[in-house]
Amino acid sequence: MYVAVMDNIFLLVLVTLLSVVQNVFFALKVEKECTGQHSKNHSAAFERLSCANRNCMDTYPTFLAVLWCAGICLSQAPAAFAGIIYLVVRQKYFVGYLGQTCQSTPGFLFGKRILFFLSLMCVVGIINHLMLTYGGSDYKEYIQTITKVVSTLLLLP
């Protein structure tokens, strides 16, 4: 039984752990900037880093919720794939914020698109479960096939 449960959530666990490592990286960058020399440029850089870190942390609970909901309610592989892409985009957003704020905009917009996709997967998975429970119709295999194909479209800019 343990193996069956782990097979259904293993990819989600990996993405979650990678996101934790990324959060540690962000925190270390902020700490490094905070403990560096105190100059006018340092203050601006610290403010940008701190703001980027805060923005990433604001969306983190939403990301985890929709990642796990999409993976459990519908399909773990497309959810984990979207989660990996989200982490890459979040890294791009964070690093973009170190330069000029406008450099982070593409990462922010792309991240919103991925969160929308994961949210949509959650809703579809819940609707399919309700249809199976109360209507006797199960479309999970068809929906999983569609989400696997659609998840690759997330790579398009």
Image: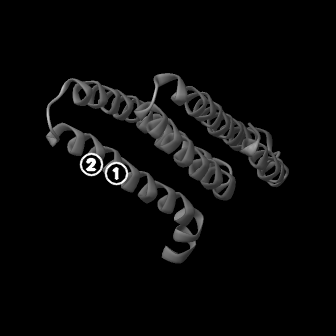
Q: Determine the residue positioned at 68% across, 42% down.
A: 125
In which quarter of the view is residue 11 placed?
Answer: bottom right
According to the picture, the residue beneath numbered tag 2 turns out to be 28
Q: Secondary structure at mark 1?
A: helix
**Is residue 138 visible to us here?**
no
> What amino acid type is highlighted by mark number 1?
Phe
In which quarter of the view is residue 26 placed?
Answer: top left
Q: Secondary structure at mark 2?
A: helix
> What amino acid type is highlighted by mark number 2?
Leu
According to the picture, the residue beneath numbered tag 1 turns out to be 25
Give the quarter of the figure containing the C terminus.
Answer: top right
Q: In this rendering, is residue 39 above or below 139? A: above
Q: Nearer the viewer, residue 100 or 21?
A: 100
In which quarter of the view is residue 126 placed?
Answer: top right
Check contact, mark 1 vs mark 2: CB within 8 A. yes
Q: Where residue 130 appears, x then y in whole percent?
A: 69, 38
Apparent side of residue 145 relative to residue 116 in the rendered image (left or right): right
